Image (tube, rainbow, N blue to C red):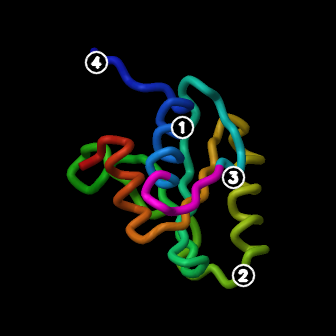
Amino acid sequence: MTARLTSAVLVSALVRRVNQAGGSAMVLAKGDATAGAILVLTYQKGTNPRFFERGLGPQGVPALIASGPQDIGDAAAVSAYWQRRRGFDSDLWVVELDIAEAERFAAETFDLY
């Protein structure tokens, strides 16, 4: 069995990488530091919100997969979605990224490429 980085370390690394690249990253909700799931909310210049999380891809290997509603209308709907998810899973981390290619930053940080 191989060792895995904790959720807290992965989130910290993701936030640091995005901020160092000139983007904006913030933790909206802290989950379990050791093994909490991580929900990533991405924006590009404050628009086009999308959700991603680690999961199993079509080939059965770990991947960053799209999550949540595909067409989110406004900020209230975005907030309602992740808060509803937190209601079911208090261990869930929620991280917001606003940078070009935010999905790539998350996948690279989570070592999913």
Question: Residue 38, labelled with which disc?
Answer: none
Question: Residue 74, labelled with which disc?
Answer: 2
Q: Earlier in the sequence, mark 1 or mark 4?
A: 4
Q: Earlier in the sequence, mark 1 or mark 3?
A: 1
Q: Which quadrant is the N terminus positioned in? A: top left
SS class, disc 3: helix
For marks 1 and 4, give the one nearer the viewer. Answer: 1
Question: Residue 85, labelled with which disc?
Answer: 3
Which picture quadrant has residue 71? bottom right
SS class, disc 1: helix
SS class, disc 4: loop
Does the residue at mark 2 contact the one at mark 1 (Cβ under 8 Å)? no
Residue 82 image point, x, y percent: 69, 58
- Relative to 31, is 58 on the left or the right? left
Residue 86 image point, x, y percent: 72, 47
Q: Which residues are magenta?
A: 20-26
Residue that badge 1 annotates: 12
Circle 2: is it few (<14), some (14-19), or many (20+) Cα within 10 Å? few
The residue furthest left is: 59
- Relative to 108, is 90 on the left or the right? right
| C-alpha distance separating marks 3 and 2 | 17 Å
SS class, disc 2: loop
Residue that badge 4 annotates: 2
| C-alpha distance separating marks 3 and 4 | 29 Å
Which picture quadrant has residue 88? top right
Name the amino acid, label 3.
Answer: Arg
Q: Earlier in the sequence, mark 3 or mark 2?
A: 2
Tell whether position 23 is magenta. Answer: yes
